[in-house]
Image: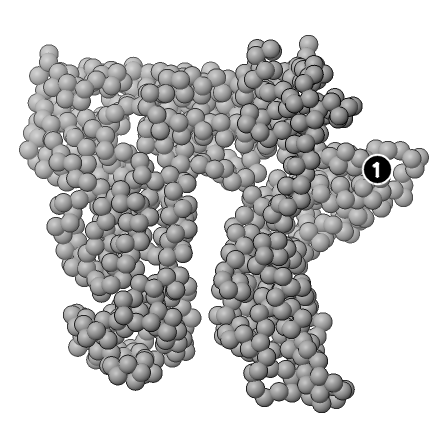
Amino acid sequence: MLTNREKVLQALSQKSRMINDPNNLGVTANEIAHELGIQRSTVSLYLNELAKNGDAIKINTRPVYFIDKKVYEQDKDDFIMIRKYLEQDTKEKRSDDPFSKLIGIDGSLKNIVDQVKSSVIYPPNGLPCLLVGDSGVGKSMIAHLAYEYAKKNNFCSGEWVVLNCAEYANNPELLSSILFGHTKGAFTGADSEKSGLLEAARDGYLFLDEVHRLTPENQEKLFQYMDRGLYRKVGETQLNHTSNARLIFATTERDNADFLQTFLRRIPLVIQIPNFQGRSRKEKIALISVLYLKESKLIKRNLKINSQVVQLLLNNVNKGNIGKLSNLVKLSCAHLLLKQKPIDQNLLEIKIEDLPEDFIKQKDMMINFSDQDFSIHINYERDNVYSKNTSESDRLYAFASQIIEMIIILDTNEHLTKKVTKSLSELSNQIIDYMSFELNDKRKSVFTDYIESTLKGVLSAMYLNFGLNQFNSSTHLLTKLVTYINDYEDGHVLDHLLEANMVIKKRFGNQYKLCQMLVDALKHQFSIKNELLFCVFMFNFLFSQENHLVNRKINAVIVAHGYSTASSLASTVNRLLGNYVFEGFDMPLEATVDDILRKLKEYFKTIDQEKDLVLFVDMGSLTKIQDKLRAMYSGNIGIITNVSTKIALVVGNRILNNESFEKIVHESAQDIYPENTIIHQVKKPGAILTTCITGIGATKYLQDLIRESTNGEIPIITRDYYELKENSIQDEVFQQYQIKILIGMDDDPEIEGIPYLSIEGLINRSVGDPIFLKAFPKVFNEENLGRMNKNMVKAFTVDSIASNLSVLNPEQTVDQVEHCVRKMERSLGVQLDVYLKVSLYMHLCFMMERIILKEPNMDYPDLDNLRQCYGHFIKIVKDAFSDIQHYYTIEIPDSEIGFIYDILKNRISIHQ
């Protein structure tokens, strides 16, 4: 009996032969799915795999078409449109981004490539950048790709010039001559004037490898060139030569001990390149595959690289990195050719004994072979590489992408919930079928037994506490899923993964907690790299059935005094309902109302507070708890006293049926007559609050930036830092608005319960994105957050800050401020980080304008203490600004210096 994959291949071949229209582009997945009665997504998966393995040709139009490769190549002239498409596609591929050939472009090197590209495109002549990494990681290759990218996109037109500084480390004068050129008679043997590499690289790139081997004198000459574009030849006394050569450096030194700090400060981008072991498993297998493919073409033999060989290379190439790996690959192929008989055998297998002896016998060799198939198959004639491990990894991420896509749809269209629930259920079955029948992995090991035992324990606890009993008998399937994810998860970056998790947490908060319980239990058994990936698979597996995928609009809590009273009641009701509805909080008998409120406050942080809340309590009086709850929770709150199993069961059923909140609270216990009340909240608009120390200029600018990035959808309010610090949560702004994010340029004013974002947080997406997504899920998504971040980074450049000055010359002011900050750094003996500099530049630009307009800020608190304890700091600042004060005939008041002190005091050490 044919497998589904074989059926798809057979159908593609038959339908390809039936094409008789030269303008036809091929066969679609829909056509094959309809003929075979198989889901379209499954057919599409197999067709893409066939295309990847070279058995089919993929036509990337809309819709996507496929044709059997053998059928097409038998008579290409019969397929005119397909041939034209492929010819055009080949031309376009030749003009692709040079970085596309880099392994890891969509993984561990993604951010690195983005940084390198930003250094290329920055006007007018790019930004110097320093590539840092161990020997053999590919620094030279990345540097040359930067040049190719610049030339391809018309950012430069000159030559690629390379100098390895280590070759001349013992002769600094010769190195200086090679770099900058020399005059006639500059030294013995200088019979004529000669230009250096800076001139040779005019309009192009100069790449200095092992740049840490430059002497301090040569570093000084280079940073003079980076500052002003001027340099002097050896033997000259004046800077009188210019060049626009772009600079890119590389070093193996991570601690920067051999660099002058003045030299490093001229290099805005210092980029760390990961070593071989820092790459994802998928990337490492791809690197091994590419190197063996290269050798396979040289020796003209198809290769199979044994699974154990691949595992040894994956885990034991530590020193030398990709360069070392390349040598190991060459030597193993050479050894194989030497021993192989007959010589004309076309398929050769690389085994452990083919690897160099010194590599196999190294002291720290990791030998821990997995049953998993890591073997690589290479067909040099078809330029084809196949690895089951990487193909299964691709399939895993294809499944994950489908789950994520469906979850995102759930958040964007409420009416599609039933349809999406059905699709999720079908996809869950498809994944289970694939693991059970097609993957057919029947391994039983200590690891799988241990995982299954762990999952049984967690699922049993879920049944006892939360009523989840449907999947207890399917623990072995869940074990297979966990093992599948663990085997083939390779660190690949998935679009919208964080957003999907946020959607699940927001719409199905209780279920998401159970998923996290499972993942937390598994974390104790083995290392989980991507918890978010595991969470979406757990959610799909456990809650793909329609009755378990209800977006409940009401949170429900039971609070009772006594040991396990509330938790026992909650778990009993959850089991009877067959669903996770109630949270139970046990309180000691001596617990006060404030103790209960503290417990609830912690719980509120984990749920969507916009939903209504039903709160069961065992107290007889409501008066002590109402007012304080109103201030702690955003949604409407229904309180029911004298809780019992019967009333909780009635209310739980109504919650699952999404009945009206007020109807549930008022009518749920008509036969029991509990006391009840509803707290109606005045809905306050959600807003962002901005603040800074001076409260002038910079805050207004920051406010405008955020408003522009959010298209005015979110109210943005500004408050003076010191007022906010003093008033805290009592400030009137919190009475008018529900402040969800606080953004500032200085210290966190520490407003309880409100997340704070500094400039660093705004620019660093891993910090800022989750905060924005949680605070305003209907406004922000991954796409517009990326756009906003790009605008923020652009807006915070010094030029953009200066361009918002109203009377001062922007370029001149920035140069003056930058000069002052450099003097302050030297006097204070510190180097300010880029984020602090941006903040300080912004503040100083607006400060200058205030003083010149005779509107200085004189309201610095505790000025006498500043003068008494930090008089030396006042003197340092005034000395740094002496040229500016003389130029504009102004004097910077001590109060303004106080604000500068406040910006710096918690970031650097300022001695009394």
Front one among 83 and 137: 83
Residue furthest out toward the right: 342
Q: Residue at x 27, y 62 (%)?
A: 698
Q: Quadrant of residue 639?
A: top left
Q: Which residue is mark 1?
A: 301
Front one among 435 and 817: 817
Task: Tell me: residue 443, above or below residue 249.
Answer: above
Q: Position of residue 86 (x, y in %)?
A: 68, 33
Task: Tell me: residue 688, above or below residue 393.
Answer: below
Q: Position of residue 314 (x, y in %)?
A: 66, 43
Front one among 505 and 790: 790
Task: Report the amino acid beneath label 1.
Answer: Arg
* Image quarter (top left, top right, bottom left or bottom right) of the C terminus: bottom left
In the image: residue 480, left or right of residue 694: right
Q: Secondary structure at mark 1?
A: loop
Q: Residue at x 36, y 20 (%)?
A: 417
Q: Residue at x 15, y 27 (%)?
A: 638
Q: Position of residue 183 (x, y in %)?
A: 68, 85
Residue 268 in sight: yes
Q: Quadrant of residue 543?
A: top left
Q: Residue at x 68, y 9 (%)?
A: 1
